[in-house]
């Protein structure tokens, strides 16, 4: 049986490496220009369009600030592209019921987030749902059918500034890099957790014998979700304490695991082209967030 398992893993490993690797020469078909030429309007009634009661109280706005995170389920124009295969593989090994294959972080509800991707010399990039053509990774996607979920985390003023300064520094220096092989680490751990009962499979649902990485250990190679987990652990005390208590390593965090970091609450969901409409609708429902949104 042991020999059989080893043989199976030896067969599976090259396939995983092939699927997890990203090819910068991927050829893609962009049909958004025709969609726009057809004069189709933004459809705010899509099933993806949801405004949530975040659960934050008025007291939460008396002090401190909010960090924001977007989780994406991209719909790639070219179904045969390597990034689309990566998305499918993430879905296969994902231990969580939510769907997402990319993530980014922001400091307001403006359509201006930071995400770590391939497809240009600088891997840490600005991301706009309404202007995906300005980001070579997002340009691969159809903004009318790609979706996003925006979440918020209450932090102290000092934690907010620490995260903002870290992102701005990393963006300016461009020393952090998207490393495709890191997906293999995330994927193998996710597949192991997927075999466990749901209560144990989710982030923090089980104690790990090994895995915790101190937040002061600086790495330069990440994928999108491990970079966000690193930033949060390094800058937000509650996240660092949660990771340390449960022996969670930020290098094993998948996109949907970010849902389960304590304190994050869902604000709204939409297709990419509906992002500002959804944000405006959310502000109407929860005007205390208005300082974070400028149309």
Image (cartoon, rainbow, N blue to C red):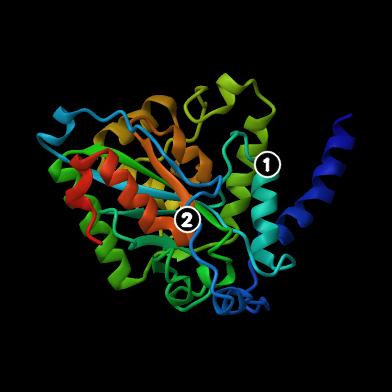
Q: CA distance from mark 1 to mark 2?
A: 17 Å
- Based on the displayed image, in which of its 4 quarters is residue 108 positioned? bottom left
Asked if one can make out residue 231 in the rendered structure from this viewpoint, the answer is no
Packing grade of label 2 (10 A; few <14, some 14-19, many >=20) is many
x, y percent for residue 41: 50, 66
Give the residue at the far left of this rendering.
62
Marker disc for residue 224: 2
Give the residue displayed 50% in from the left and 32% down from the top.
210
Q: Is residue 108 left or right of residue 80?
A: left
x, y percent for residue 156: 16, 39
Relative vertical location of residue 149 with respect to residue 208 in this rendering, above or below? below
x, y percent for residue 257: 50, 38
Relative vertical location of residue 117 with respect to residue 252 in this rendering, above or below? below
Give the residue displayed 43% in from the left and 63% down from the top.
129
Instruction: Identify the secondary structure beneath mark 1.
Output: helix
Relative vertical location of residue 88 with respect to residue 137 in this rendering, above or below? above
The image quadrant where one finds the C terminus is bottom left
Instruction: Identify the secondary structure beneath mark 2.
Output: helix
- Based on the displayed image, in which of its 4 quarters is residue 266 positioned? top left
The image quadrant where one finds the N terminus is top right
Residue labelled with disc 1: 93
- Does label 1 or label 2 sit earlier along the sequence? 1
Q: Report the front residue among 33 and 264.
A: 33
Q: Report the front residue among 165 and 10.
A: 165
Q: Are marks 1 and 2 in contact (CB under 8 Å)?
A: no
- Based on the displayed image, in which of its 4 quarters is residue 188 positioned? top right
Packing grade of label 1 (10 A; few <14, some 14-19, many >=20) is some
Asked if one can make out residue 283 in the rendered structure from this viewpoint, the answer is yes
x, y percent for residue 190: 62, 38
Q: Is residue 87 left or right of residue 152?
A: right
């Amino acid at each position: 049986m042991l020999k059989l398992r080893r043989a199976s893993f030896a067969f599976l490993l090259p396939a995983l490496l092939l699927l997890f690797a990203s090819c910068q020469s991927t050829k893609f078909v962009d049909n958004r220009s025709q969609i726009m030429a057809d004069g189709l309007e933004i459809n705010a009634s899509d099933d993806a369009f949801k405004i949530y009661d975040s659960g934050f109280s008025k007291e939460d706005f008396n002090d401190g600030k909010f960090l924001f995170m977007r989780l994406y389920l991209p719909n790639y124009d070219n179904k045969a592209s390597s990034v689309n295969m990566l998305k499918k593989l993430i879905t296969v090994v994902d231990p969580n019921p939510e769907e997402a294959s990319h993530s980014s972080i922001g400091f307001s509800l403006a359509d201006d987030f930071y995400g770590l991707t391939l497809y240009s010399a600088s891997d840490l990039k600005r991301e706009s749902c309404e202007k995906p053509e300005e980001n070579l990774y997002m340009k691969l996607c159809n903004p009318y059918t790609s979706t996003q979920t925006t979440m918020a985390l209450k932090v102290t003023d000092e934690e907010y500034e620490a995260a903002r300064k870290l992102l701005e520094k990393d963006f300016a220096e461009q020393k952090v890099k998207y490393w495709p092989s890191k997906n293999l680490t995330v994927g193998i751990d996710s597949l192991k957790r997927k075999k466990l009962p749901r209560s144990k499979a989710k982030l923090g649902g089980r104690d790990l014998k090994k895995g915790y990485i101190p937040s002061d250990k600086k790495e330069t190679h990440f994928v999108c979700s491990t970079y966000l987990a690193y930033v949060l652990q390094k800058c937000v005390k509650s996240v660092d304490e949660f990771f340390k208590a449960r022996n969670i390593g930020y290098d094993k965090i998948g996109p949907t695991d970010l849902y389960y970091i304590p304190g994050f609450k869902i604000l709204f969901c939409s297709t990419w082209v509906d992002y500002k409409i959804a944000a405006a609708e959310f502000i109407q429902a929860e005007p205390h967030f208005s300082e974070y949104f400028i149309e």
